[in-house]
Image (cartoon, rainbow, N blue to C red):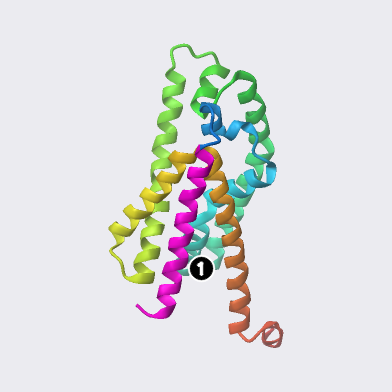
Amino acid sequence: MNTTDIIILGTIIAYLVGMVLVGIGFSRKNENVGDFYLGGRKLGPLVTAMSAEASDMSSWLLMGLPGVAYLTGGAEAGWTAIGLAVGTYLNWLIVAKRLRVYSQHCGAITIPDFFSQRYKDKSKVLMGVSALIILIFFVPYTASGFSACGKLFSSLFGWDYHIAMIVSAIIIISYTCTGGFLAASTTDLIQSIVMTVALISIVVFGISSAGGLRQGHRQC
């Protein structure tokens, strides 16, 4: 392992330790179930938006979308990005605010709990069905995030893919289960800032490697 690899590894380890410390720090602020699952409904709009998009886009944006563009071409990746952007915008515009107001009004903490209380389902069938749907779709989503972590360490340092994935999963689960929603949102906010800086750096590096903006104008 050369000096560059050691620096990269040290940075990643420091980052992961910092995430765990965030979880421990927020665990002391959780006084009830509502604080753990919803952060006491006190999360600001900036942190909410940034953390939501970071958790939604992280491995897909940095690994999945470039992979789609490489395999199928830019048009396919472009339409995928456009569809996701439109869907996300409509979700925030139509669903998010109403769900926020109604869930607080009926005292619901989770989505299945909201459906059960909103439609007065005393049999809890609606709660069970919605929980099952979430489980079915979020298991592959969560697994893809763990898989991205394993591939990252495997490609960077040549580590065993499964071991790297398991270690990453343990760290993620530890700070999430320790600090709850506030810890997850704060770590997602940090990740979104890192992702933004990385994406901008990649664009600048790519333009520079291609000869700069003037070179692109000459080719046109």
Q: In the picture shown, does residue 64 fall above or below 132?
A: below
Which x, y percent locates residue 197? 61, 65
Q: Is residue 110 left or right of residue 48?
A: left
Q: Is residue 177 left or right of residue 106?
A: left
Which x, y percent locates residue 174? 41, 45
Magenta stretch contains residue 92: no
Point 70% across, 88% down: residue: 218
Point 43% across, 41% down: residue: 138
Displayed quadrant of residue 214: bottom right
Point 43% across, 67% down: residue: 10
Q: Amino acid at mark 1?
A: Gly
Q: Is residue 217 left or right of residue 71?
A: right
* The N terminus - image quarter: bottom left
Point 44% across, 16% down: residue: 124
* Residue receiving disc 1: 73
Toward the viewer: 199 or 183?
183
Tell me the magenta residue range.
1-27
From the image, give the main secondary structure of the stretch colored magenta: helix
Displayed quadrant of residue 217: bottom right
Magenta stretch contains residue 14: yes
Local secondary structure at mark 1: loop
Q: In the picture shown, does residue 141 fall above or below 102?
A: below
* The C terminus - image quarter: bottom right
The outermost residue toward the top is: 122
Which x, y percent locates residue 31? 54, 29
Which x, y percent locates residue 26? 53, 41
